[in-house]
Image (tube, helix red, strand yellow):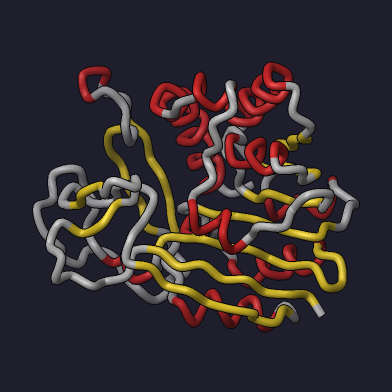
Amino acid sequence: MTDYTKSNRVHWNARTAVNAARYDIAGFKVGKSTLNPIELEELNDVAGKSMLHLQCHFGLDTLSWARLGAHVTGVDFSEDAIALAERLTQETGLGARFMCTDIYKLPQVLEDKFDIIYTTGGVLFWLSDLGQWAKIIAHFLKPGGILYLQEEHPFLNVFDDSADVTDLHTRYPYFHTEQPIRIEGLLPFSDPAANQRSVEYSWSFSFSDILNALIAAGLRLDYLHEFSHGSNRRFPFMVQSEEGRWRWKDSTNDIPLTFSLQATKG
């Protein structure tokens, strides 16, 4: 495990408690789903199918798919996140399995093959090696199995998304660099008065990096969709619509916020 990964794991262990306080866990326990409309429309036939959820955090999406009848395995490298996911599994009685491991070590500890691999919501820029990630996906998919990815648009990653920014200006590279981006500051979404600080490392990947990694791993792209709305407030100057989606406050701004894709193993 690299120093970058160790630092990120410390970051996500600390972030687990912060996020648990932000999310509506009580509502989830009584039946609320955390899946967004795009996912439910595009990935709508999961009953009875095996699903591997990569970078699952503490498993609310994982367990939401279990409620829809999928046989789900959730994987994350944060011990605190997986511990919370397992508690939620016991409390809700939903059938899901969780594993705490670095994604790059997953082939060493898991032998199953899956109908669906699912990963969404700010996952790619935590990966140091996108080519190896794609190979791991191909390894765990059954023939004819699908990858479903919904992610923040890679072009967004060039912009400064600090809590106090007032407009769009570039800060980070769009194209991949071997050395990660180091960000140090207050733990996201934490109480500023608590002065919880963390160090995190992330990597930039272009759209071509993402698609070419999947193609090189032997997957066939079925579709690619881009959207002008997202599921979180990535920048302070965004507004939430009545249906709960976040959009640019300036309606003339048509920079895409999210994308989804499906790819199939031949």
Q: Residue furthest front?
A: 242
Left or right, residue 45 beside residue 182? right
Q: Is residue 118 above or below residue 217?
A: above
Which residue is painted at 11% across and 59% down in the image? 167
Q: Is residue 76 visible?
A: no
Which residue is painted at 39% across and 66% down in the image? 153
Which residue is painted at 72% across and 39% down in the image? 66
Q: Residue furthest right?
A: 111
Q: Is residue 172 above or below residue 29?
A: below
Q: Quadrant of the C terminus?
A: bottom right
Q: Position of residue 128 (x, y in %)?
A: 55, 61
Q: Position of residue 3 (x, y in %)?
A: 53, 45
Q: Position of residue 29 (x, y in %)?
A: 59, 22
Q: Is residue 93 visible?
A: yes
Q: Is residue 111 above or below residue 205?
A: above
Left or right, residue 200 beside residue 117? left
The residue nearer to you, when weighing 178 against 230, is 230
Which residue is painted at 12% across and 62% down in the image? 250
Q: Is residue 229 above or below residue 79?
A: below
Q: How many numbered callouts?
A: 0
The quarter of the picture where residue 221 lies is bottom right
Q: Position of residue 115 (x, y in %)?
A: 81, 60
Left or right, residue 63 beside residue 170? right
